[in-house]
Image (cartoon, grey):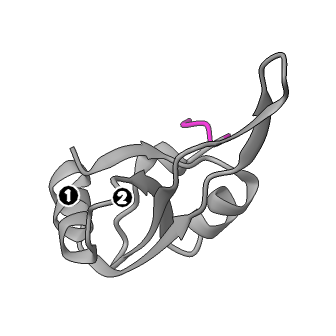
């Protein structure tokens, strides 16, 4: 499974109006794999894919306040062609 989850934030929802959708993907996935996975899952035509490796945050834990680190993860920003949209990012719109 290449796509892990959609990233729903204030910035990603505003970018969805410009046909740019943000997903968390596997760290080992490349742009071609992400493009094929989005096209298959949502039946859209993907124009471009941008990937970013987000470094994991450090945090302190335990009785001795040991420093630990969360895993790195990858984010992909997918641009869709035409008048197609991905419904996961349409927040607050009501159908009448």
Q: Quadrant of residue 25?
A: bottom left
Q: Closer to the camera, 78 or 25? A: 25
Outermost front residue: 64
Give the percent coordinates (x, y) of residue 67. 75, 40
Q: Residue at x 46, y 44 (%)?
A: 88
Question: What secondary structure predominates along the stretch shown in magenta?
Answer: loop
Q: In the rendered image, which residue does mark 2 sit on?
A: 27
* Direction from residue 95 to residue 12 in the image, left or right: right
Total residue callouts = 2
Spatial separation of the CA atoms under disc 1 and disc 2: 14 Å
Q: Does the magenta portion include 93?
A: yes
Q: Where is residue 63 in the image (x, y as percent from the top left)?
A: 84, 16
Q: Name the residue under label 1.
A: 37
Which of the pair 53/81 is nearer the observer?
53
In the rendered image, the vertical position of residue 77 relative to residue 4, given as above or below: below
Mark 1 secondary-structure assignment: helix
Picture quarter with the C terminus: top right
Which stretch appears magenta?
A: 92-96
Contact between labelled residues 2 and 1, with CB atoms less than 8 Å apart: no
Which quarter of the rendered picture does the N terminus lie within?
top left
In the displayed structure, 7 sits above or below 49; it is above
**Mark closer to the observer (1, 2):** 2
Q: In this view, does 94 lie to the left or right of 10?
A: left
- Vertical side of 30 occupied by 12: above or below: above
Query: Outermost residue toward the bottom?
Result: 48
| Percent position of residue 70, x then y | 60, 43
Residue 85 rendering spot, x and y as whole percentages: 40, 60
Does residue 72 show up magenta in the picture? Answer: no
Label 1 environment density (alpha carbons within 10 Å; few <14, some 14–19, many ≥20): some
In terms of secondary structure, where does tag 2 sit? loop
């Amino acid at each position: 499974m290449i796509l892990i989850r959609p990233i729903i934030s204030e910035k990603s929802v505003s970018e969805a109006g410009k046909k740019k959708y943000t997903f968390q993907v596997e760290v080992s996935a490349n742009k071609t794999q992400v493009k094929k996975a989005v096209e298959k899952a949502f039946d859209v035509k993907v124009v471009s894919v941008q990937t970013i490796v987000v470094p994991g945050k450090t945090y302190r834990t335990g009785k001795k306040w040991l420093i630990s680190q969360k895993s790195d993860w990858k984010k992909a920003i997918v641009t869709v062609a035409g008048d197609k949209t991905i419904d996961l990012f349409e927040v607050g719109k009501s159908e009448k």
